[in-house]
Image (cartoon, helix red, strand yellow):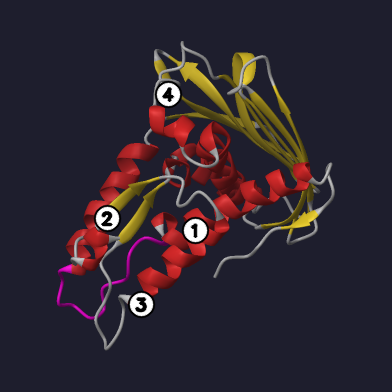
């Protein structure tokens, strides 16, 4: 915040905050910087999942599915000494730990691919054989009434990441995959009528989010009044909405799976 107060642009590692309370205070502070016609510096949250070409394509295809019937998100990966992120001390020492740090990625992907917000959740958590290996199982409902299942496991011995949306006119699935030595996602489209389509998209979300941040900084120095504002995908509000869903899931688990309404951050 000292950097922002000094008028410098900031690209912050996700998550946007460790809690909704912290995020609300951060949003209030940030908005206070835009007074008397002075634009605040850019505060961007580095969430590459909102920039992944595969997930953007999946979101586009989901709009062709008609009425959405259900959404399934599966994220399984071993969080142990073989995982390069395991040694990141800060990920273990801040409120939320790996569950929040990893979880916001897949909430961002869920919100992007489904083209809707999560309105309520009912979740159960379970610790695996080590402190970091948490399983988060969740039944969610989106604002459009569509139910969903979200599973996040960091005790898995293998890796599986997929986003699957079933609609009245077909199904779309984005699944992590490797092709010719490149890591990325396959996007499969199964329309009710016609042939299925399968395409592979290498990972490039990190590069794309960095390009967006640089572009936003260039636009911020422009005197052209018609220039659009910063890319909303990197906004503090978007990052905060991801945190809100994870926090609601953990609150639900603390209540033995009782439904919890997700706080909608504006």
Task: Return the mark for residue 124.
Answer: none
Q: CA distance from mark 2 to mark 3?
A: 16 Å
Q: Mark 2 highlights which residue?
A: 10
Whether residue 54 appears in this view of the structure is: yes
**Crowdedness of circle 2 by 10 Å Cα count: few (<14), some, many (20+)?**
some
Viewer-nearest of labels 1 and 3?
1
| Figure check: 22 above or below 257 | below
Q: Specify start and end residues of the magenta stretch as a single range.
A: 221-232
Element type where label 2 sits in the image: strand
Q: Mark 3 highlights which residue?
A: 32
Does 235 lie within the magenta span? no
**Crowdedness of circle 3 by 10 Å Cα count: few (<14), some, many (20+)?**
few
- The location of residue 73, given as percent across then percent down, is 68, 36
Viewer-nearest of labels 2 and 3?
3
- The location of residue 82, given as percent across then percent down, is 46, 11
Q: Earlier in the sequence, mark 1 or mark 4?
A: 1
- The one nearer the camera, 125 or 185, is 125
Q: Earlier in the sequence, mark 2 or mark 4?
A: 2
Quarter of the view holding residue 228: bottom left
Element type where label 4 sits in the image: loop
Q: Mark 4 highlights which residue?
A: 85
Q: Mark 1 highlights which residue?
A: 22
The quarter of the image holding the C terminus is: bottom right
Q: CA distance from mark 1 to mark 3?
A: 16 Å
Q: CA distance from mark 2 to mark 4?
A: 23 Å
Q: Earlier in the sequence, mark 1 or mark 3?
A: 1
Q: Are the two marked residues, 1 and 3, in contact with CB atoms closer than 8 angstroms? A: no
Q: Earlier in the sequence, mark 2 or mark 3?
A: 2
| Figure check: 245 above or below 264 | above
């Amino acid at each position: 915040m000292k950097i922002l107060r000094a008028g410098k642009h900031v690209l912050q590692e996700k998550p946007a905050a460790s809690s909704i309370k912290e995020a609300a205070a951060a949003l209030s502070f940030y908005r206070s910087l835009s007074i008397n016609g002075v634009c605040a510096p850019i505060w961007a949250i580095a969430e590459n999942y909102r920039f992944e070409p595969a997930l953007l394509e999946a979101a586009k295809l989901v709009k062709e599915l008609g009425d959405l019937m259900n959404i399934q998100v599966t994220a399984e990966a071993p969080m142990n000494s073989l995982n390069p992120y395991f040694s990141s001390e800060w990920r273990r020492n801040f409120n939320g730990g790996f569950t929040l740090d990893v979880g916001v990625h897949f909430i961002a992907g869920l919100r992007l691919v489904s083209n809707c917000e999560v309105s309520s959740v009912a979740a159960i958590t379970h610790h695996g054989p080590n402190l970091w290996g948490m399983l988060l199982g969740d039944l969610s409902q989106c604002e459009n009434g569509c139910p969903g299942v979200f599973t996040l496991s960091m005790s898995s011995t293998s890796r599986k990441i997929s986003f699957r949306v079933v609609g009245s006119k077909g199904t779309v699935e984005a699944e992590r995959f490797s092709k010719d030595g490149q890591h990325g996602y396959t996007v499969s489209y199964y329309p009710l009528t016609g042939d299925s389509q399968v395409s592979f998209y290498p990972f490039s979300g990190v590069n794309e989010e960095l390009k967006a941040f640089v572009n936003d900084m260039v636009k911020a120095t422009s005197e052209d009044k018609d220039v659009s504002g910063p890319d909303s995908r990197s906004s503090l509000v978007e990052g905060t909405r991801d945190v809100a869903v994870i926090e609601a899931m953990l609150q639900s688990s603390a209540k033995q799976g009782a439904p919890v309404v997700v706080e909608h951050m504006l």
